[in-house]
Image (cartoon, helix red, strand yellow):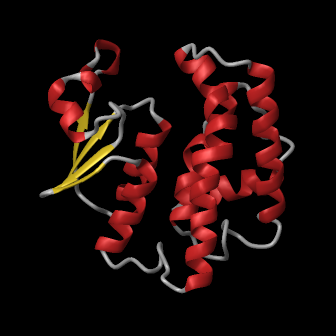
Amino acid sequence: MKLYHFPLSGHAHRARLFLSLLNVKAEIIDLDLANGEHKTPEFLKLNPFGQVPVLVDGDVIVNDSNAILVYVATKLGRKDWMPDDLASVAKIQKWLSVAAGEISYGPCAARLITVFGADFRADEVIARAHRILGLINAELENHRFIIGNTPTVADVTLYSYIAGAPEGNVDLAPYPEVRHWLARIEAL
């Protein structure tokens, strides 16, 4: 496997973190985004969106961080990380959608302002971040990980941008359950 990666990307971090948690050896290929390496014709053949991460596994190309998590867990038969009972699948899908929605438009967007100079309204994205963090904090009052008492791909997809939220001036102090959950993920 090869993982096309950029060290400051939270999306790329998700994929790399999951490979690490599963002890999957992959060739990590860091792209120079500042110099447009993600917009070269060669890279655009792998991902026409010109974004990282991209996982190449033989003839299979997976070019979305959430899709990479699901692909790797499924390929390796890791039902501990990607259970196949319908209730768990539905819960995981919900959190993958939250990561692609509320997390992207909240903590991720806040971090993009400070790390990359993105042109977003800080007050709006920070308010969105606090709304979703409040909901996640309440969810975590009921169990150790986001859908139960063991980690799944849902935890990995949420982790990177929540852990990086302070880089976007989003204070995690009001969310004790989130902070404990971050520590549990980090202990893995």
Image spot of residue 99 (x, y percent) = 60, 50
Q: Is residue 118 above or below residue 1?
A: above
Residue toward you, 166 or 114: 114
Image spot of residue 155 (x, y percent) = 58, 60
Question: For this view, does 141 lie left or right of residue 67?
Answer: right
Measuring 44% from the left and 80% from the top, which residue is drawn there? 79
Q: What number of labels is visible?
A: 0
Image quarter (top left, top right, bottom left or bottom right) of the N terminus: bottom left
Question: For this view, does 53 lie left or right of residue 184?
Answer: left
Image spot of residue 112 (x, y percent) = 58, 24
> Which residue is situated farthest in the bottom direction here?
85
Quadrant in the rendering for residue 108: top right
Measuring 27% from the left and 23% from the top, which residue is drawn there? 39
Q: Is residue 97 above or below residue 108?
A: below
Q: Is residue 19 visible?
A: yes
Image spot of residue 69 (x, y percent) = 41, 59
> Which residue is situated farthest in the front direction here?
48
Measuring 36% from the left and 31% from the top, which residue is drawn there? 6
